[in-house]
Image (cartoon, coloured by chain):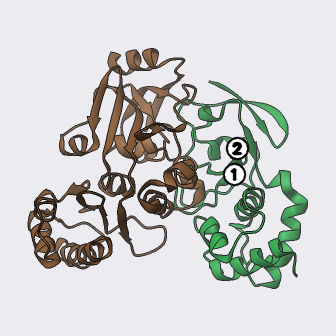
Amino acid sequence: MEVKFNLNGLDVVYHVKPGEYLLDSLRANGVKSVKKGCNASACGACTVLVDGKPTLSCSVLTASIEGKKVMTVESIQEEAAELSEYFAKEGADQCGYCSASLALVVHALKEENPHPTRQEITDYLVGNLCRCTGLQSQGNAVEKYLGGKK
Amino acid sequence: MKVNEYVRAASLKEAYSLKKSSPKNKILGGGLWLKKGNGEVDKLIDLSRLGLDQIKEEKDYVSVGAMVTQRAFETSLIIKKIGGGVLSDAVHQIMGPAFRNSATIGGSVYGKYGFSDVITALLGFKVDLVFYPEEVVSLDEYVKKPGFADGILTEVRIYKSSAKSFFKKVKMTALDYPILNVCVTKDKDYRIVVGSRPLVAYLCEGAMKYLNEGGKDVDQAVELATQELKLGDSMSAKGEYRSHLARVYLKRALEEVK
């Protein structure tokens, strides 16, 4: 079937199977920044933004995003690069597998709640697992990033 | 799960007609448990264009459309007013925001999942389920009846309440399924709910009757509740451990809301 949506500002048409998941469609079309982790709605590595909201692409059918706006990390490259400096400084980055999804989640958090408390940061990041560093250092990095401190 | 055809329903009438036409045709809720199922769906019916994603405040109840996401539900100021915000708190503890941005309230309720935090929390209140074409069933009845409704769940009606409320989800890690969940509310009457038994949530009617008829002894109420509860084993915990947890948290809950 044909699915039309907006990907990172460009209107695209994907030809997919009715039961195909967005993660697989994106990767099949060359968007490899979206990672396949658990493939079971648990790790968050596949997170993209659908109409601005963090969404697990491993668990959303591509057919269901007809007419919607999908953002991957390619659309926030400068912001992701800036955030990665905070991550590096706090030791919150190692293998990088979760980094793209985390950058998107932090972007969504900033849009939704520009001045979050530490608890709100933790609650927002909790669905994105990092097996290298854990959420503590990432929380520190995001807190400083959103607070504007290096 | 293999899906042969994806249909974006233009009306509830069309969706219902498709659902009725074959047992292999299924309604799509949030879709998060779809891939965990085996077998084949002939037509997967998408309700997302039917305006079922609204939360509205009516005179006596709050109307929650079946396609309202868990995230929209937990952040709704209307929902936060019910029972001191216990429903928001309960849903907030489910996975991360990306999960809750897809999972729907209708899907969570309709599926009668044993691990559901949504059902346990909602059972703490008077709730009606509205099915298309024309059936209204209380949530209390729905979870007791075997099987699933024939109609399409369109709305969850939560009757307004300023009950003192307690909700506890016992889990091993932040993103885990509950080992047990407990919701106790006290408005005019007590409502005592234990879920993830690992079966679907259960209203402890014996203990409720005791308290609602004037019983004052919390230990006696806990004893009655644990006697009527059927708690089983699962990969995460044995029934014996669940029974211990139920005693601890029911006592804590009853002392908190009394």
Q: What's the CA distance linking mark 1 and mark 2? A: 10 Å
Tell me the chain of label 1. A
**Residue, x 87% and y 58% (percent of image)?**
A77
Using the image as rendered, state which of residue A66 and residue B56 is in the foreground: B56
**Residue, x 28% and y 75% (percent of image)?**
B249
Asked if B66 appears above or below B134 in the picture, the reply is below
Q: Which chain can be seen in green?
A: A
Relative horizontal placement of residue A141, taking residue B200 as reference (left or right): right
Secondary structure category for the residue under label 2: helix
Q: Which residue is mark 2?
A: A26
The quadrant the N terminus of chain B occupies is top left
Asked if B73 appears above or below B48 in the picture, the reply is below
Tell me the chain of label 2. A
Relative horizontal placement of residue A50, taking residue B106 as reference (left or right): right
- Same chain letter for marks 1 and 2: yes
Secondary structure category for the residue under label 1: strand
**Residue, x 28% and y 68% (percent of image)?**
B235
Specify which label sits upstream in the sequence, 1 or 2: 2
Q: Amino acid at mark 2?
A: Leu
Question: In the figure, residue B96 lies in which quadrant?
Answer: bottom right
Question: In the figure, residue B222 lies in which quadrant?
Answer: bottom left
Relative horizontal placement of residue B144, taking residue A77 as reference (left or right): left
Q: Which mark is residue A48?
A: 1
